[in-house]
Image (cartoon, helix red, strand yellow):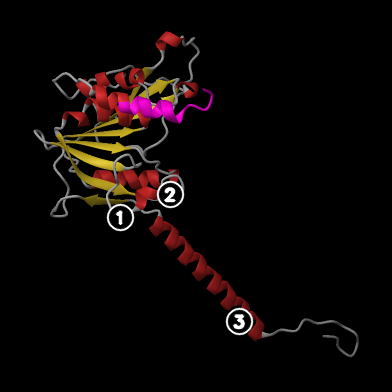
Amino acid sequence: MATFFGEVVSVYSRAVEEDEYDDMTNENEEDEQIRREIEEKRAVDVHWLSQTDGGSVPCSDLIIAVGLNATGFVSAYALSSGGWTAVAWISLWNERSPGSGRADTAPGPGEPSCILYQQKHSPSVLICQCSCYVAEDQLFQWTEKVLSCVQTRGLTVTVLSDCSVAEYKTSDYLSESSVPFLRSLRTSAHTGPVASPALEQPNISTGLAAVQRIPAVLYQCYSDVLQPDSLSMQTYRAALLCFSSRGTHPSADVLQKITRGGELQSNLYT
């Protein structure tokens, strides 16, 4: 607005300022609602297949298998014996695992899933077989939810995980005969024996969130094969023998099915 002497002054309007404040408030509320909806959609939940009292399950050994070879190993070497019962599944949703988020229906056979199994003759031993993708922003929540459903007193956690040998850093030459191989990484609370050499620096392990104040050991299989193969699965046998006094014998049918499925999916250059 111009005055009589030609000076231009700004026009102050409380109504305009209040409108801008209301718009900002509405935008913040909308952003907050969108954030809550995203968090709810990407939530990780444990669903029990049998009735429980809502408390944690007694557990002395929890074996977590993540990756194609690790999950294939527990299928062929442990679950195929018939001495295990599915007791729960973990639901989650992300762009790479859209079908794993069905909270009302357990995953079907062959579907990417995360299932908790209990050993029949020793109910304190559990296996968590995770064949679905867990996004980076869900890793901490996933670990927290899985550990919250078991008693941590006297618990030992064993994690089996896959990794490409291309990510392994070493100054020594790696021959084809030395691959696949196993490396371990354990928490300070774990004082028992381990089944493989320790992971050397500067190598790091990525994936599930670190377990704190619980005896835990990670066994990472470095392989040059992208799909499941029996040789890579066999590297985990030593880890399984650490807490099992009995020998481990794979199911030939399950092993063939797993490796055959990998061959069918990796025929791009054949």
The answer to whether any part of residue 186 appears in the image is no
Q: Nearer the viewer, residue 47 or 259?
A: 259
Find the distance from the CA under tag 1 to the CA under tag 3: 44 Å
- In the rendered view, would you say 261 is above or below 39? above
Which region shows up in magenta?
Answer: 257-270
Judge the density around disc 3: few (<14), some (14-19), many (≥20) Cα neighbours within 10 Å: few
Q: Amino acid at mark 3?
A: Glu
Horizontal and vertical percent for residue 259? 35, 25
Q: Which quadrant holds residue 232?
A: top left
Residue 103 circle label: 1
Residue bearing mark 3? 18
Residue 80 circle label: none
Residue bearing mark 2? 94
Q: Amino acid at mark 1?
A: Ala
Of helix, strand and loop, which one carries label 3? helix
- In the rendered view, would you say 256 is above or below 118? above
Is 96 on the left or on the right of 231, as rendered? Answer: right
Judge the density around disc 1: few (<14), some (14-19), many (≥20) Cα neighbours within 10 Å: some
Quadrant containing the N terminus is bottom right
Circle 1 or circle 3, nearest the eye: 1
Horizontal and vertical percent for residue 76? 25, 26
Judge the density around disc 2: few (<14), some (14-19), many (≥20) Cα neighbours within 10 Å: some
Residue at the image position 18 percent from the left and 25 percent from the top: 243
- In the rendered view, would you say 27 is above or below 241? below
The mark nearer the N terminus, 1 or 2, is 2
The mark nearer the N terminus, 2 or 3, is 3
Please tell me whether residue 195 belongs to the stretch shown in magenta: no
The answer to whether any part of residue 193 appears in the image is yes
The majority secondary structure of the magenta stretch comes to: helix
Q: Nearer the viewer, residue 96 or 56?
A: 96
